[in-house]
Image (cartoon, rainbow, N blue to C red):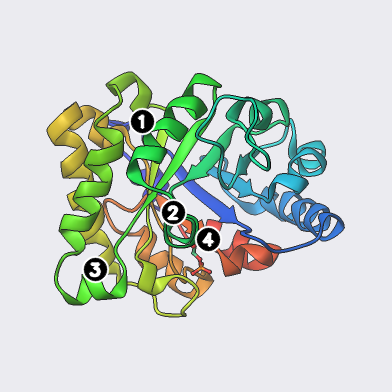
Amino acid sequence: MKLFLNDCKNMRKYIVAGNWKMNTTVPEGVELAKAVLAASAAVPADVKLIVATPFTHLCPVAAVVGGTRIGLSAENCADKEKGAYTGEVSAAMLASAGCQYTILGHSERRQYYGETDEKLVEKTRLALANGLDVILCVGENLEEREAGRHFAVCESQIKNVLYNFTAEDMKHIIVAYEPVWAIGTGKTATAEQAEEIHAFIRKTIAEKFGEQVADDTTILYGGSCKPSNAKELFAQKDIDGGLIGGAALKADDFIGIALSF
Ligand code: 13P
């Protein structure tokens, strides 16, 4: 109902994005994309649906979702433009494969692959230069939350990356708040815990870019989001949808979440 209550003072989009992570073979991914597309008819047109797939799946999944309401995202991109960087995939390659988005800064990449805020500035710059919208992930781990540092961690991740960009660039940047302790653990942040950080992230964006840009920025919640808890999360003023891991691997659950606005 939130959709209809939006008084149009902002350009914020409501988005449900599935992050498939390192799951599914190519044929399984194609089947999943087909199932998501088939089930998507039930979702109101003003909810944007996105699937973020492994690199190997992008072209075959683009053949399924291209020209439909479902956006296609990568899960990462290189911090270099092109050249001798064996094993990397550039933003230009992603765009040419049919992607409109890339996730950047997921906590799993920060934790396991040494993704730093400095690298994320470069990645974001290259993604935007190649016409991709960025889904930038931020969030604290359990130790940081228990030490009461969750606001400070999110603030520095936002400032270190986004403050290098312009208000115009912000039209192409979506933020995803993903508390690491809630990812894949079955422990969801409560709607109140999520909302207070979302509101804080929006305020941090407003301090640099002004209220209008902050109001127009889509901020997604991620971390054990499922059909049973999405409604309460999405009802919050500053939660504009979800970045979904495990539940995105089942078309019915993913669409169930998208029906929760
Ligand atoms: P889960 O939904 O499996 O907790 O994963 C969330 C996530 O990391 C999405 O990027």
Query: Disc 1 versus disc 4: distance between alpha carbons?
Result: 22 Å
Name the residue type under label 4: Ile
Residue 250, above or below 160: below
The residue tagged 1 is 11
Q: Earlier in the sequence, mark 4 or mark 3?
A: 3
Query: Disc 4 versus disc 3: distance between alpha carbons?
Result: 18 Å
Few, some or many C-alpha atoms within 10 Å of disc 2 (few <14, some 14-19, many ≥20)?
few
Secondary structure under the numbered disc 4 in the rendered image: strand
Query: Disc 3 versus disc 1: distance between alpha carbons?
Result: 25 Å
Which mark is in front, 1 or 4? 4
The residue tagged 2 is 114
Query: Disc 4 versus disc 2: distance between alpha carbons?
Result: 23 Å
Residue 71 point in image, percent of width and height: 63, 39
Name the residue type under label 1: Met
Secondary structure under the numbered disc 2 in the rendered image: loop
Residue 193 - label: 3
Residue 169 - label: none
Few, some or many C-alpha atoms within 10 Å of disc 4 (few <14, some 14-19, many ≥20)?
many
155 sits to left or right of 136 = left
Q: Earlier in the sequence, mark 4 or mark 2?
A: 2
